Image: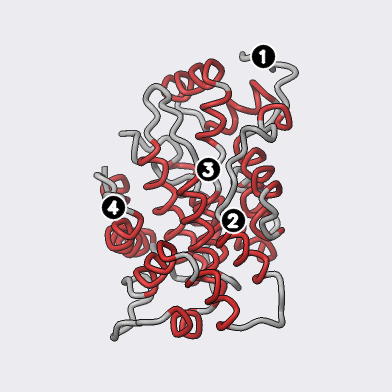
Amino acid sequence: MATTIDPTTLEEVFHSEVLPALPHSAIALLQLSQRSDVGPAEFAKPIEADPGLMGQVLKFVNSSYFGFSREIMSVQQSLTLVGSRAITNFALWNAVFSVIPNPKFGPFDLKSLWQDSLRRAIFARKLGKNLKVENAEDLFAGALLQDMAIPLLLKELPEQYQSLVERRALEGRRLSGLEQEMFGWDHAEAAALLAQRWSLPDDFVKLIAMHTQIDELLDQGDATRGSACVALASLLPSCSESDWHEQAEFVSGFERLTDTSGTTLPDLFAEVDESTADFAPLLKLPAPARTLADYLNA
């Protein structure tokens, strides 16, 4: 059994020099999202001041994710039609995507991590909507951001993570369990700490922090269904792996979460695969080589 390495605390790993800074436009949107006295005009200002972000937002709103029959031409119209929450969450992940470093770590592929994150986010949102969970757009953002600390951890602790990656491949266990054995914390706690350092909303911090605790969330019933959707998404197969190590755990959790909803896994996977293929080009990503349906039918 691995022994805990001391004193590698999260605070020591994520010292101030390690943390990248979010773009000003993302920070401004996050600050606005915490206020109840602002509308589309105020949210549009930081987006329109960042031409790159404005272009991405318009592509996002005109994607099949929303399925509008006509092209949306302005940021304010976009905010009015889809809401400030959806656009702020998209802008947040777009910002994180731009600042997280590529650690060039062994077999690790940053592109695959973002592919995984996108597919998990789409799954969490669709499942949340099927279950009529409030604020399903937050589930999208929470699942997108749940693994954002992994590249930083690989960069800062390469020797330890080489061992963890090898053990995951050999034993087929979850990375979070191996991290707990070695460090006494996992990448969910690391991502939550990163979210706190960036002053992200508390709801995001909670979604991120709990994403490795599916059983505990399911045991709490309806009150934690949203968090359970994000946690269940974390059990989806990774694009970088040929085997779906957590399939049995995923299917069991899915059945518990959807037992009275009428949601079927093949239909949900088909929707997620289609949306992922449509959405990936917005983030300059290829669609995953293997669909979720492929893993399910293997």
Indicate which label's residue lies in the foreground, 4 or 1: 1
Q: Is residue 240 left or right of residue 103?
A: left
Cα separation between marks 4 and 1:
38 Å
State the residue lying farthest toward the front.
49
Packing grade of label 3 (10 A; few <14, some 14-19, many >=20) is many
Whether residue 219 appears in this view of the structure is: no
Indicate which label's residue lies in the foreground, 2 or 1: 1
Residue 9 is situated, as x and y percent measured from the top left of the image, at 73, 26
Q: Which residue is mark 3?
A: 147
Q: Which residue is mark 1?
A: 3
Please name the amino acid that badge 3 sits on.
Answer: Asp
Residue 228, numbered label: 2
Residue at x 41% of width, y 41% of height: 113
Please name the amino acid that badge 2 sits on.
Answer: Ala
**Mark 1, secondary structure of its residue:** loop
Please name the amino acid that badge 4 sits on.
Answer: Ala
Residue 198 is situated, as x and y percent measured from the top left of the image, at 66, 50
Q: Is residue 77 above or below residue 114?
A: below
Which tag, 3 or 4, sits closer to the chain's start?
Answer: 3
Packing grade of label 1 (10 A; few <14, some 14-19, many >=20) is few
- Quarter that holds the N terminus: top right
Q: Is residue 271 above or below residue 294?
A: below
